[in-house]
Image (cartoon, helix red, strand yellow):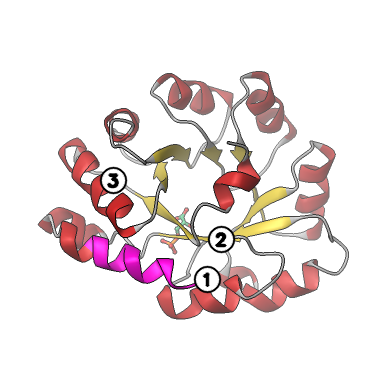
Amino acid sequence: MNVRELMQVAPVIPVLVIDDVASAKPLAEALVKGGLRVLEITLRTPVALDAIKAMTDIEGAIVGVGTALDGDDLKRAQDHGAVFAVSPGYTAELGKAANDISMPLLPGIMSAADIMRARDGGFKEVKFFPAAQSGGPTMLKALGGPFTETVFCPTGGINVDTAKDYLSLSNVLCVGGSWVAPRSMVEAGDWEGITALASQCMSLK
Ligand code: 3PG
């Protein structure tokens, strides 16, 4: 799947921070059961790569890496089974590294200049990060003026109540967020609760 296709699988891409690798499989199962198949596992904990590997066993799950900062991150994640990558920002080096290993990349942008640099690298599907803190839906509407071909996955500070405002924009294909898998619910093993939050996302668009 290319990035645009990945962005259209479901209205929400859960952004996951996994502290305990034992929670990886049940968490992925719970999210997929609720309808959210595209999962972003952030490289922010020591077990992140093992969690990616574990989640690839779950039928229906499309597992990617988040917080990818450089080519090494992309390569390590790909070696552990990640099939796409998300980065908080964009550099030409990262774009080239992704192309070199054929890793679909959803790079982060926060400004018109960022979008132009990503476009120079061939990236017209981008993550708007941090979305709420950087102007939210009104900013995306404004960016839609000059950048008619670019589509966005806003992420950062979004919740179930604000997601609709983003998803109603024509240049937004999906949103990302951690609210669907709160750390407290993961720690408590509340998989049914997480499935319920995922199901709620499916009716957003
Ligand atoms: C992140 O990379 O931290 C994501 O943007 C998630 O943001 P959120 O926790 O505000 O949803």
Which residue is depicted at the point 31% across and 37% down? 59
Per the picture, the main secondary structure of the magenta-coloured stretch is helix
- Can you give x and y, in whole percent of width and height, for residue 163 in the image? 50, 73
Residue sitting at x 65%, y 64% = 172
Left or right position of 58 against 5 = left
User: For residue 111, which numbered disc appears in the image?
Assistant: none
Where residue 150 appears, as percent x and y from the top left, is 77, 55
Q: Is residue 59 within the magenta segment?
A: no
How crowded pointer 3 is (Cα within 10 Å; few <14, some 14-19, many 20+) is rated as: many
Q: Which residue is mark 2?
A: 174
Q: Amino acid at mark 2?
A: Cys
As displayed, is residue 100 above or below residue 155?
above
Q: CA distance from mark 3 to mark 2?
A: 19 Å
Mark 2 burial class by Cα count in 10 Å: few <14, some 14-19, many 20+? many
* Residue at the extreme right: 146
- Disc 1 target residue: 205
- The answer to whether 160 appears left or right of 47 in the picture is right
- Does 197 lie within the magenta span? yes
Residue receiving disc 3:
28
Q: Nearer the viewer, residue 33 or 31?
A: 33
Name the residue located 40 percent from the left edge and 48 percent from the top edge.
37
Mark closer to the observer (3, 1)? 1
The amino acid at mark 1 is: Lys
Q: Which residues are magenta?
A: 194-205
Q: Ligand 1 shows up in which quadrant of the image?
A: bottom left
Q: Secondary structure at mark 3?
A: helix
Determine whether label 2 and label 1 are within 8 Å by CB: yes
Q: Quadrant of residue 93?
A: top right
Task: Specify which label sits upstream in the sequence, 3 or 2.
Answer: 3
